[in-house]
Image: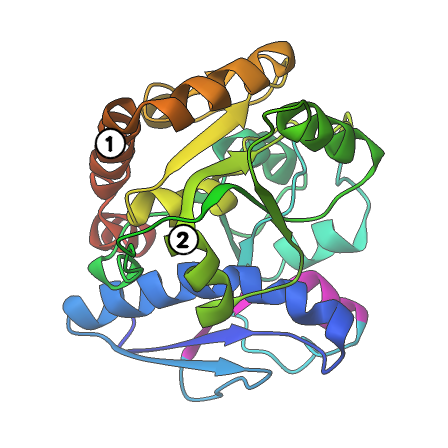
Amino acid sequence: MPPKINLTLFRPDHPRFRIMDSHLEVMHSLQWGFQALGVDCSMHVNQFDAQRTNIVFGWIIAAQMGALAGLRDDSILYNFEQFSQRSLVGSGIAQLAQRFRIWDYSAANLPRWLDCTPRFAPFHAPVSYAPVLSRIATPAVQDIDLLYIGGGGIGRQARLNEISGGSNAPSLVVLHNVWGEARDSFIGRSKLLLNVGNDNPQHRIFEVVRVAHGLANRKVVVCEAVPGAHVEADLQAAVPIVARAQLPALCERLLADPGERAQWAERGFQAFAQRDVRTVLRRGFD
C-alpha cells in the first residue's frame, strides 16, 4: 500500500464537463477506504501531486489535453468507459496502458486491456460501498414517483414516455448534469429511480455507477434488461431488471406497493454493502 494517495478528477472548467462529477461518489468511497486503512489520501479537481501516487478520474480528457505528460509512472488511471465491444490495440489509450496502471470498474473491459500488452495487469476495481455514501435523508412525503438521472437520446426518451404515459401517469422527473446536494435532494424525494437502456451496441455493460448511489441510500432502481449486457453477478438479484415492454407495469406495481418497494430497497442496499471498498483497495495494492 503506498504511503500517500491523491485522487484527482480531471474536469475542464466548462458546463459540458460537469458530467465528470458522476465520478465523485466513487472518489468519496475510495478516500474513506484509504483513510480507514491508515493511508493518507487527498482528493482534488485538476490537481496532481508529485509526492503521492495519483489515481486519475477523467483521464481520457486529460490525455487529450496533454495533462498526463508529466504524471508519475506509478499513477493509476481509473476507467469508467465501456470498452468491452471495441478493440484498443494501436490506439493512444493502449499506449497509456503501456505506461500507467489501469484500474477498471468492469471485468468485461479487462480482455480489451490485456490485448494492449499493458505494463501491468489491469485490475478490476468494482464500484464499492463505504458508509460515507449513505447520506441521503428520505423525507416523510416522497412527492416524486419516478426519477431518471442521465442523458437522453431518442431511444431513452421513448422508454421514459412509455413508462410515464397514460391517463393515470406517474410523475416523472428527468435530471441531466445535476450533481451533489441538488441531485441528492431529488433522489430523497423519489419513490423509484430508473435505469433505462442504451441503444448504442458498444454499450453493453450494466450502468452500475448510476445504480450504486441509489442502492447505497436504500432506493429502488428499476432497470431495463439489455440483451447481451454484462451485469455483475451480485447485483442481478439485487435490483428489479425486466425487459423494456415490462417496465411500465413493473413501475405501476411498485408504486402501488410500498411494502414491496421497501423489500427491494433493503435487498439492494445489503447486496451493495457487501462490496467493502477496503477489500478492493487491499487487493489493488497486493
The vertical placement of 73 against 52, above or below, is: above
How far from the left and from the top, in percent, is residue 266?
21, 34
Q: Which residues are magenta?
A: 53-64
Q: Quadrant of the N terminus?
A: bottom left
How far from the left and from the top, in percent, is residue 227?
64, 13
How far from the left and from the top, in percent, is residue 73?
54, 71
Q: Which residue of the protein is positioned furthest toward the front in this rendering? A: 167
The vertical placement of 252 against 113, above or below, is: above
Q: Which residue is mark 1?
A: 262
Residue 189: assigned label: 2
Disc 2 on helix, strand or loop?
helix
- Examine the structure image and report whether residue 101 is included in the region drawn in magenta: no
Q: Nearer the viewer, residue 226 or 196?
A: 196
Q: In whole angstroms, how far apart are the C-alphas of marks 1 and 2? A: 15 Å
Q: Quadrant of residue 171?
A: top right
Measuring 24% from the left and 31% from the top, which residue is drawn there? 262
Residue 41: assigned label: none
Q: Nearer the viewer, residue 16 or 127?
A: 16
Measuring 38% from the left and 23% from the top, which residue is drawn there? 256
Mark 2 is surrounded, within 10 Å at the Cα level, by few (under 14), some (14 to 19) or many (20 or more) other residues, namely many
- Whether residue 181 is visible here, answered yes or no, is yes
Q: Is residue 179 left or right of residue 259?
A: right
The vertical placement of 34 against 41, above or below, is: above
- Examine the structure image and report whether residue 57 is included in the region drawn in magenta: yes
How far from the left and from the top, in percent, is residue 135?
28, 62
Q: Nearer the viewer, residue 229 or 105?
A: 229
